[in-house]
Amino acid sequence: MNPSSYSETALLDFLQRGQSDINPLLSSYFPEEDVAIPLYQAVRYSLFAGGKYLRSNLCLAACASVGGMREAALPFAAALELVHTYSLVHDDLPAMDNDDLRRGRPTNHKVYGEATAILVGDALLTEAFTLIAQKGVASGVAPETVIKAICELGEGAGLNGMVLGQFLDMLSEKKITMNEKEMAIVHQNKTGALIVAAVRIGAMVGNATPEQMLHLTEYAKRIGLAFQIADDILDVSGEEKELGKKVGQDQAQKKWTYPRLIGLEKSIDLANQLSEEAIDALDGLGENADHLRWIACFAVKRKK
Ligand code: GRG
């Protein structure tokens, strides 16, 4: 694919199709009838709040890139959306980033209180694994692949992945200096690890060969970092209305970001370079991987 043929409208349509395929599964898992219980209402509040469904769509697109069945990947994609939403709900808490606005609406703890928001995150994380265990084999995936996917999700989200990244990010606020290598480690874990898991799980479900898995992992590592650098850039130069969250928060919280470390221009160049490298990593994969190529473009061109 020639990346210049990338169209944001087509990509957003693609993400929307993923959302439409995943939401019935999520909705039947967390039914509307249950909202009489405020905890269920609080779960649905954050889950159906208009996210981009990037990680879930990455899972679906990675599965398709190796010729896998979309239907088989849906429960895994849904579980990724649960883990991602949990991370946002907890990230917004007063003990973490203390944000008031997410996806264009008040954050979960602002509406339901801190204790409920903690439980919402706990529930989303836990149910992600239950959902895969319940629906993975039923969707036609071999039990051993389901177990591998559960491990992959745990590794990406857990103590050596996203949670570690969040902790390193917190520590970095107290640092007077930071180098690019340290910065990359924070971003690769905080944001990259779940993105890598999303792609690898999709590839597993699609029965990727070891070589395909290698290429897809390289792709995912690069877009994971590029996506977070783009997030840093948007915090400096994005529009609050479009982003659905406050801008300038990184600076207000004295966070180390790429723009702070190497400047805005160099950050943009680095994000673009990573996006190109991600596309190059897919060279052996043919046109089935075009949606992944589009996502690599979107990761750095996005406005929200
Ligand atoms: C374990 C208490 C506890 C908390 C964990 C791990 C964690 C909190 C937070 C994860 C770190 C995090 C929120 C990283 C930011 C990643 C990022 C760029 C999020 C925004 O992703 P988008 O733009 O969001 O895909 P939408 O709203 O579109 O889904």
Image: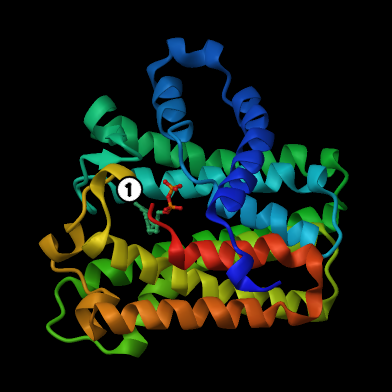
Mark 1 residue type: Leu
Task: From the image, tell me which residue sits under label 1.
Answer: 243
> Which residue sits at x=83%, y=68%?
208
Give how far across and how far down residue 193 sits, in percent: 51, 67
Q: Quadrant of the N terminus?
A: bottom right
Name the quadrant where ligand 1 sits: bottom left
Residue 159 seen anywhere in this rendered image of the structure: no
Give how far across and how far down residue 131 sits, in percent: 66, 38
- Left or right position of 265 against 252: right
> Which residue sits at x=61%, y=58%?
153
Q: Which of the two residues, 42 or 3, is positioned nearer the viewer here?
A: 3
Give how far across and how far down residue 111 sits, in percent: 26, 26
- Left or right position of 291 against 195: right
For mark 1, give the secondary structure: helix
Q: Is residue 294 above or below residue 21?
A: below
Q: Which of the two residues, 259 or 209, is positioned nearer the viewer here?
A: 259
